[in-house]
Image (cartoon, helix red, strand yellow):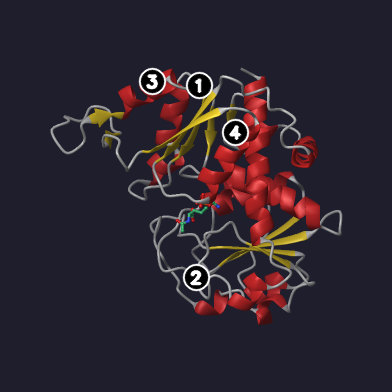
Amino acid sequence: MKQFINVNDIGDIRAAVAEALEVKANRFAYKHLGENKTLLMIFFNSSLRTRLSTQKAAMNLGMNVIVLDVNQGAWKLETERGVIMDGDKPEHLLEAIPVMGCYCDVIGVRSFARFENKADDYEERILNQFIRYSGRPVFAMETATVHPLQSFADLITIEEHKTKARPKVVLTWAPHPRALPQAVPNSFAQWMNAADYELVITHPHGYELNPAFTGNAPIVYDQDEALRGADFVYAKNWSAYADPNYGKILCTDRSWTITTEKMALTDNAYFMHCLPVRRNMIVSDDVIESPRSLVIPEAANREISAEVVIKRILESL
Ligand code: AN0
Ligand code: CP
């Protein structure tokens, strides 16, 4: 595997889950693979889980790991070509990327949507420059439009907990005080469709996601109706995708918060969220603390999804 951005990069999804469960049962079995190989993790944005789980996964594989927080200690980076660099940014991404490539064998990149220009975000301008100019395999640690390590971990978690061959999985929007990217719901929808689960999406009007990710999944604007019969409830906030409101908050209605009453509409569903989560905005204390909450197992499976991805990249070097 030479890159990991979209679900198709992982190939057969059942085989990927089987490999994940095998790695989970013996996570040090491939310790020789990463010997004398270096992973460079580049963060343009904050992280707790991605940073720790990906580093742990690389260490399980015997790799050396370098983490660079671009906003802490590195030179401020210009990202536009053609700019006269007389401002506050002393270095250009076009030099920084090949330089970074000199010091590693594999690169992970976290670079969120900037919400300045929808086309720039959805064309993955930053990620694609890493792919083009680093000379190294690149994997996404949440880009402008996708978060595949999260979705792969979510898929593993559902496979471990499902009791039906084709569970009903409800992706629900929930309120949040800041404008958040669409990367997590985009990827989640893409991966759930690839897994051929019954995916239902619910959100207020105006929050329609890019159909390239959601495919044929029905949108049900009444959250209560969507939740009926659900086996898994995946809550997430995102900002509007559709023009002219791209990146904007259109709704703050707290009746969309996932509460015990909302969960009572489901078929004793599990609750899921990628974290970090704002309690009593996205989900009530009771639901996130309940035995049906999978937020910690999801986070634990981030180590496993990252290990499968890095293992496959190492095998292709
Ligand atoms: C980010 C997001 O919504 O994309 C990261 C989630 C993994 N969340 C926040 O910025 C709070
Ligand atoms: N779920 C997730 O990616 O968390 P972090 O933003 O903390 O890495």
Q: Measuring from the top left, give residue 200's x and y in whole percent.
A: 69, 61
Q: Between residues 27 and 97, which one lies in front from this camera angle?
A: 27
Residue visible at 49% across and 64% down in the picture: 206
| Distance from Cα at disc 2 to Cα at disc 1 | 39 Å
Residue at image mark 4: 58
- Identify the amino acid type marked 4: Ala
The image quadrant of residue 228 is bottom right
- Binning the other alpha carbons within 10 Å of mark 4 as few (below 14), some (14 to 19) or many (20 upward) gives many
First of labels 2, 1 by sequence position: 1
Q: Quadrant of the N terminus?
A: top right
The image quadrant of residue 283 is bottom right
Residue at image mark 3: 98
Residue at image mark 1: 136
CB atoms of marks 4 and 3 within 8 Å:
no
Q: Between residues 277 and 207, which one lies in front from this camera angle?
A: 277
Disc 2 on helix, strand or loop? loop
Q: Measuring from the top left, give residue 22's x and y in whole percent.
A: 80, 37
Q: Which mark is residue 216?
A: none
Residue that extends furthest to the bottom in the rendered view of this protein: 261
Does residue 190 appear anywhere in the picture? no
In this rendering, the label closer to the viewer, 3 or 2: 3
- Binning the other alpha carbons within 10 Å of mark 2 as few (below 14), some (14 to 19) or many (20 upward) gives many
- Identify the amino acid type marked 3: Pro
Q: Measuring from the top left, give residue 186's x and y in whole percent.
A: 57, 50
Residue visible at 49% across and 59% down in the picture: 238
- Please state if 49 lies on the left or on the right of 216 as rendered: left
Residue at image mark 2: 175
First of labels 3, 2 by sequence position: 3
Give above or below for 100 relative to 243: above
In this rendering, the label closer to the viewer, 4 or 3: 4
